[in-house]
Amino acid sequence: MKRFAFSMQALYDVKLASEKQAQGAYAAARNALDQAEELAQACLAKLQNDELRLEEKARAGMPASDFQNYQAYLKLLRQKHTELQADVEKAREAMLQRQQELQEIYRDKKALERLREEQYQAFMQEQLAKEARETEDLLVFGMMGKMQEARNDPA
């Protein structure tokens, strides 16, 4: 019996390799997003904590110069938090792009798998039809042989 050969096997193999690469890129992008979010959260927590400390110190009484220095420090911390939030958004966009690429590869791979299944079903039907013809030919030749023997046998 002839073996089944998928006509687009090379493309399917490329899609499998692309899928593994895209999964790795997606995981890296997801990790980068997680790290960016952690940094932004840590900065926000520090900012909130330091704002509370400034408020407590201001109530207790602190020199104006210290208050101004603390305000400048908090302003820098707010700017840093804004920058980190921008980094989070960039990381999120990169992760979403990698996710879309991965989904596209999944769709292509599924389409190839459906095509492979259709080709396999057609191959199997062809093989069954071929076997049926061969069996029919054997039966016909066998019947013809018996008829020939019956004609040749005068008894």
Image (cartoon, rainbow, N blue to C red):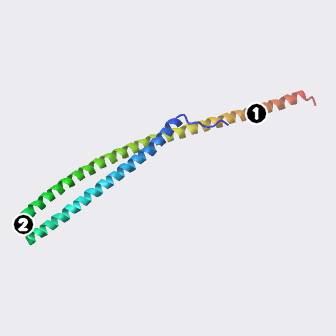
Determine the residue located farthest toward the left in the rendered image. Answer: 64
Residue where numbered disc 2 is placed: 63
**Among numbered discs 1 and 2, the one appearing first in the sequence:** 2
Residue 78 located left or right of residue 155:
left
| Three-letter code for the amino acid on which mark 2 is drawn | Pro
Residue 128 located left or right of residue 32:
right
Q: Position of residue 139 (x, y in %)?
A: 76, 34
Mark 1 secondary-structure assignment: helix
- Give the residue displayed 34% in from the left and 48% down from the top: 95
- Give the residue displayed 13% in from the left and 70% down from the top: 56
Q: Which of 66 and 11 lies nearest the eye of the viewer?
A: 66
| Three-letter code for the amino acid on which mark 1 is drawn | Leu
Q: Which of 105 and 40 lies nearest the eye of the viewer?
A: 40
Q: Quadrant of residue 142 in the image? A: top right
Q: Which of 32 and 139 lies nearest the eye of the viewer?
A: 32
Does residue 133 sit above or below 54 in this rendering? above
Mark 2 nearby-residue class (10 Å; few <14, some 14–19, many ≥20):
few
Residue where numbered disc 1 is placed: 138
Q: Quadrant of residue 50 in the image? A: bottom left
